[in-house]
Amino acid sequence: MGKKRIDQAIQNVLEQGDKVFVPYIMAGDGGLEQLPDQIAFLEEHGATVIELGIPFSDPVADGPTIQEAGIRALANGTTMAGVLDVLKKTQGKRSIPIVFMTYFNLIHAYGAGQFAADCEAAGVDGVIIPDLPLEEEDLAVPALSRHDLALIRLAAPTSPRKRLKEIAKRTEGFLYAVTVKGTTGARTEYAEEVTGYLQTLKSISDTPVLAGFGVSTPQHVKELGGHCDGVIVGSKIVQSLAEGNTEEVKELIKASKISLVKQA
């Protein structure tokens, strides 16, 4: 469970020559009762780890698509406790690692110790906290460590190399490489400097590097995956699932399966 399960899942994918694929979904978008089926669908079609967003009223890192999904989830009455309850009741039905993406306000309100204990009990393996800087991590790290939860750090392209090195040294599970200056959301193209930035992170990180923010096409998955260990896809997955377009999701995941292309 926990950190080891994330490490093992990623290692298994990389060893077979594929790229890691982490889909983001918003818990409670469409109703919490749909969550187990969404997780099962993504696991069945080859996702490596699932990033599960917890809806929040002020999601500063999220673009319009994920913000709207959060609003729908909140309107459905989704809470942190509700998400944990569903995951706890259904944890025997999945083997894919689950990582929460949540803002620190929610953890603070819940109580960091109780949050970490309940995550462990529900089979959650790690957390991403985009508004918790390195300097404030003591607010969460001791509780997360006690319950074997990985704290996955985000690296921004605007950060100086010295800070990137510190983030890379501390991250657990994987290093989340933010590839754009701004919020999440689908984009048509990436700036050329993204390639160099990903290669820099690869050179300073002993932990797998995954590229996220704006990854929205199979071509993006292939292109960015060529410069790091895999990708995280959020807004496009959220949109496709909301529209019932499961084929689009399958195509995105399939683009990370390099071994399938080699076999063909």
Image (cartoon, rainbow, N blue to C red):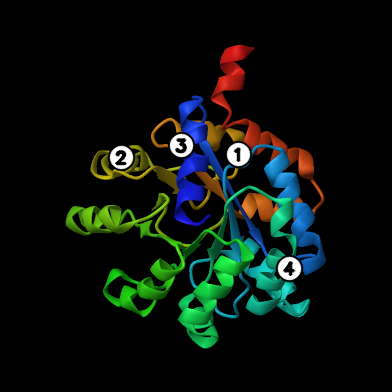
Asked if the residue at tag 3 contacts the one at tag 1, i.e. Cβ–Cβ closer than 8 Å, the answer is no
Q: Nearer the viewer, residue 112 or 100?
A: 112
For the residues marked 4 and 1, what is the alpha-carbon distance in whole angstroms?
A: 31 Å
The residue identified by callout 1 is 217
Q: Which one is closest to the eye, mark 3 or mark 2? A: 3
For the residues marked 1 and 3, what is the alpha-carbon distance in whole angstroms?
A: 24 Å
Residue 17 is situated, as x and y percent measured from the top left of the image, at 49, 25
Q: Amino acid at mark 1?
A: Thr
Residue occupying image coordinates x 57% and y 48%: 49
Q: Which mark is residue 200?
A: none
Q: Is residue 36 above or below residue 220?
A: below
The residue identified by callout 3 is 11
Residue 263 is situated, as x and y percent measured from the top left of the image, at 61, 13
Q: Which one is closest to the eye, mark 2 or mark 4? A: 4
Q: Which one is closest to the eye, mark 2 or mark 1? A: 2
The residue identified by callout 2 is 202
Which of the two discs, 4 and 1, labels the residue nearer the N terminus?
4
Q: Amino acid at mark 2?
A: Lys
**Would you say residue 61 is visible in this rendering?**
yes
The kind of secondary structure element at disc 1 is: loop
For the residues marked 2 and 4, what is the alpha-carbon distance in whole angstroms?
A: 36 Å
Which of the two discs, 4 and 3, labels the residue nearer the N terminus?
3
Residue occupying image coordinates x 67% and y 50%: 237
For the residues marked 2 and 1, what is the alpha-carbon distance in whole angstroms?
A: 23 Å
The kind of secondary structure element at disc 3 is: helix
The kind of secondary structure element at disc 4 is: helix
**Would you say residue 31 is visible in this rendering?**
no
Residue occupying image coordinates x 66% and y 71%: 84
The residue identified by callout 4 is 86
Residue 72 is situated, as x and y percent measured from the top left of the image, at 74, 72
Asked if the residue at tag 3 contacts the one at tag 4, i.e. Cβ–Cβ closer than 8 Å, the answer is no
